[in-house]
Image: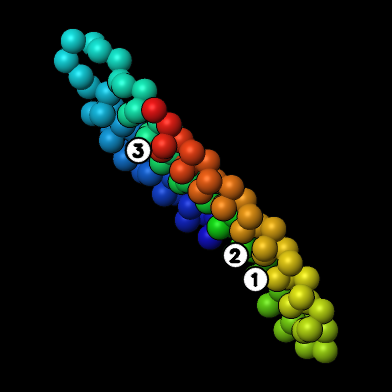
Amino acid sequence: MFFKLRKALPMLVGIFLSMTMSAFAQDGGAAPSPRYAALMAAGLAIGLGTIGPGFGLGNGVGKAMEAIGRNPEAAGSIRNVMLIGLAFIEALSIYALVIAFILSSAQ
């Protein structure tokens, strides 16, 4: 999976840069408004703030399923520990969402 992401990463970066360059192309060389910068920061905060937890959730569930497959008798304790860990990982995404809301309401 990581190899596929490594192949797609330059393409995603290129798409992102091509979109942002046209956003900053204003006549007269005027700087973007603070509201625009806050909205751009909010989008980046929620976008980048969910990449790590997404990988963490997938990796955590995958490893828990491997462990249950190897030792089915311990499924109850593995599941409980996995759910607690997933709750902590999900909290990171919620923090990114709260930061995005704060930035988007900034003036």
Looking at the rendered image, the quarter that the C terminus falls into is top left
Extreme residue toward the top, this view: 28
The answer to the question of whether label 2 and label 1 lie on touching residues, with beta carbons closer than 8 A, is: yes
Q: Secondary structure at mark 2?
A: helix
On screen, residue 80 versus residue 6, left or right, reads right
| In the depicted structure, whether residue 50 falls above or below residue 16 | below
**Quarter of the image where one finds residue 69:** bottom right
Q: Amino acid at mark 1?
A: Gly
Q: Amino acid at mark 2?
A: Gly
Q: Which residue is mark 3?
A: 16
On screen, residue 71 versus residue 15, left or right, reads right
**Quarter of the image where one finds residue 78:** bottom right
Residue shown at the point (59%, 65%) measured from the top left: 58
- Nearer to me, 6 or 30: 30
Give neighbour class at mark 2: few <14, some 14-19, many 20+ (Cα, 10 Å). few
On screen, residue 9 versus residue 82, left or right, reads left
**Quarter of the image where one finds residue 59:** bottom right
Q: Which residue is mark 2?
A: 58
The answer to the question of whether label 1 and label 3 lie on touching residues, with beta carbons closer than 8 A, is: no
Q: Amino acid at mark 3?
A: Phe
Q: Which residue is mark 1?
A: 62
Residue 61 x/y as whole percent? 65, 70
- Nearer to me, 105 or 12: 105
Question: Is residue 44 visible to us here?
Answer: no
Give neighbour class at mark 3: few <14, some 14-19, many 20+ (Cα, 10 Å). few
